[in-house]
Image (cartoon, grey):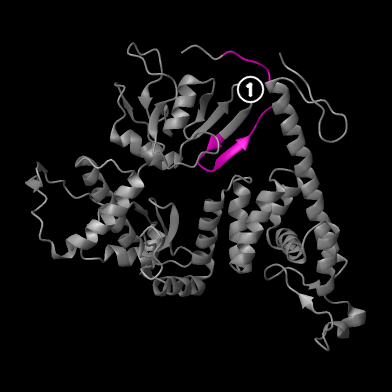
């Protein structure tokens, strides 16, 4: 039997059913989002009425005897603010002086350097907290006006769906395209930061030591490959420790076995004896990196000096890719561009590699709302259940979508459903009727005002 309870404030009665709870929660979220937009606008107005320079009192801001000075809270192109006004605004809204400084800076960055995003904040398309996260990233990296405009255009295009990791990659790409000198400087600094430290001088009471380091990405993949193989071999030999423990043991095995001497038998399936166990020699894993480049990047055209590493989903400078491909141990395979608009169809339930590859390149991630798991590691789901008599969904590029295992189970066994609007764009409906539009750029809540009605799950 359901009951009701009074809210912590006022005498509002809490809803006593699932649909009422969801509807009330969404309403509260909307009120909070609107209040945050109003506060950002007031922060901009506070800066406007406290400019760093007044024509009739320009001498006031010369640094003399500890007097008030102009401060820049946002990037180039945003107005300066009177120094002493910052603390008062922060105190008035319950923030520390430093937090108030950041808040005013975010508001000015949005208003003057990210105008497209600012407009979407004002219309409620993008929540204020998402917009502030973008502003914090563009301020923190000291982007030029051109680089900030690049970020603004691309963030505005995805209507606030950008995640932290996507935002970091977008800022990196803006630096690579519009601040090449800064990008090269950061690349050289990253090479200088490479290190590998084993903290033997700080062992724990239980006799363990920590290891920290920063490696070249290629070396990191190679080390990961070796550690993973060692952990798998330990499991094959009957080790019952957890995966993390086996990985740490594998690192020790690498050190003791001195693999650089390459004294082991060739990895051609030859049998290897370990104690009383004889087993086939495990073949070494091949490390594969998918690197995406445009012809303009290959030609070194200005503004296009950026490629992409699919394994890490990050932008990579062309110089870095050139260095990797120049490694004498690298085997470079150049694949033709895949036409994602091409329709591939097979008369079978199993999904062939050419369809799997096209779906991964088209969708990038699991297509469940807000999921970020890479598509290459996901199941290939038939949007409409496949049947032997051909009455269900076919195995083709327009009816296959990547779903991670947990969301594949939700779609199969729970009341979540989705339909294909067009290849790469999906409309999901939750058990209580809320709807979410998902494409390769992210997720948008498109729930109509009449949402929350109970519905029956369609029969397959």
The image quadrant of residue 108 is bottom right
Q: Give the extent of the magenta segment.
A: 438-456
Q: Main secondary structure of the magenta part?
A: loop
Is residue 27 shown left or right of residue 405? right
In the current view of this chain or complex, which residue is farthest to the front? 205
Give the labeled residue for mark 1.
433
Q: Nearer the viewer, residue 386 or 93?
A: 93
Residue at 47% across / 30% down in the picture?
A: 407
Q: Residues within 10 Å of mark 1 (few under 14, many from 20)?
A: many
Say whether residue 69 is magenta: no
Q: Position of residue 265 (x, y in %)?
A: 8, 54
| Residue 349 vertical position relative to residue 60 in the rendered view, above or below | above
Q: Position of residue 365 (x, y in %)?
A: 45, 40
In the figure, 250 relative to 430: above or below?
below
**As rendered, which of 308 and 377 lies closer to the eye?**
377
Helix, strand or loop at label 1? It is: loop
41 left or right of 152?
A: right
Can the viewer see residue 430 in this picture?
yes
Question: Considering the image in quadrants, where does the N terminus appear?
Answer: top right
Q: Position of residue 448 (x, y in %)?
A: 69, 27
What residue lies at 62% left-to-right and 28% top-to-bottom?
Answer: 435
> Residue at left 52%, top 52%?
165
Q: Which one is in front, 233 or 387?
A: 233
Query: Is residue 393 placed above or below 191 in the rendered structure?
Result: above
Res 334 visible: no
Q: Residue at x 49, y 75 (%)?
A: 181
Q: Is residue 452 magenta?
A: yes
| Left or right for 30, reference 205 | right
| Residue 36 x/y as whole percent | 77, 48
Q: In the displayed orientation, state which residue is furthest to the bottom.
A: 64
Question: Quadrant of the rendered structure where residue 387 is?
Answer: top left
The image quarter containing residue 342 is top left
């Amino acid at each position: 039997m359901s009951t009701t309870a009074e809210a912590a404030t006022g005498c509002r009665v809490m809803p006593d059913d699932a649909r009422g709870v969801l509807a009330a929660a969404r309403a509260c979220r909307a009120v909070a989002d609107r209040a945050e937009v109003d506060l950002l606008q007031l922060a901009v107005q506070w800066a406007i009425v406290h400019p760093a320079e007044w024509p009739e009192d320009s001498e006031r801001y010369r640094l003399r005897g500890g007097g008030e000075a102009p401060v820049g809270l946002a990037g180039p192109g945003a107005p300066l603010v009177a120094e002493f006004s910052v603390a008062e605004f922060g105190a008035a809204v319950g923030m520390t002086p430093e937090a108030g400084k950041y808040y005013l800076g975010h508001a000015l960055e949005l208003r003057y350097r990210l105008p497209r995003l600012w407009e979407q904040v004002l219309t409620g398309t993008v929540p204020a907290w998402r917009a502030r996260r973008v502003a914090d990233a563009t301020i923190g990296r000291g982007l030029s006006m051109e680089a900030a405009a690049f970020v603004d255009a691309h963030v505005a295009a995805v209507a606030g769906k950008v995640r932290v990791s996507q935002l970091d990659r977008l800022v990196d790409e803006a630096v690579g395209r519009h601040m090449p000198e800064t990008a090269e400087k950061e690349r050289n600094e990253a090479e200088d930061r490479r290190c590998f430290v084993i903290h033997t001088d700080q062992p724990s009471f239980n006799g363990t030591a920590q290891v920290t380091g920063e490696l070249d990405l290629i070396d990191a993949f190679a080390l990961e490959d070796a550690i993973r193989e060692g952990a798998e071999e330990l499991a094959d030999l009957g080790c019952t420790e957890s995966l993390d423990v086996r990985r740490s043991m594998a690192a020790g095995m690498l050190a003791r076995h001195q693999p650089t001497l390459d004294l082991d038998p060739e990895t051609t399936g030859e049998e290897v004896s370990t104690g009383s166990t004889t087993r086939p020699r495990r073949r070494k894993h091949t490390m594969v990196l998918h690197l995406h480049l445009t012809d303009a990047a290959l030609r070194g055209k200005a503004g296009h000096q950026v490629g992409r590493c699919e394994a890490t989903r990050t932008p990579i400078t062309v110089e870095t890719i050139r260095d990797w491909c120049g490694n004498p141990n690298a085997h470079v395979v150049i694949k033709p561009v895949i036409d994602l608009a091409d329709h591939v169809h097979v008369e079978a339930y199993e999904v062939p590699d050419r369809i799997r590859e096209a779906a991964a390149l088209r969708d990038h991630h699991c297509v469940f709302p807000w999921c970020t798991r890479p598509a290459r590691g996901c199941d290939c789901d038939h949007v409409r259940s496949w049947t032997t008599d051909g009455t269900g969904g076919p195995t083709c590029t327009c009816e296959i979508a990547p779903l991670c295992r947990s969301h594949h189970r939700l779609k199969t066994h729970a009341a979540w459903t989705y339909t294909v609007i067009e290849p790469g764009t999906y409309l999901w409906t939750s058990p209580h009727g809320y709807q979410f539009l998902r494409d390769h750029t992210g997720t948008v809540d498109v729930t109509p005002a009449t949402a929350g009605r109970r519905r029956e799950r369609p029969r397959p």
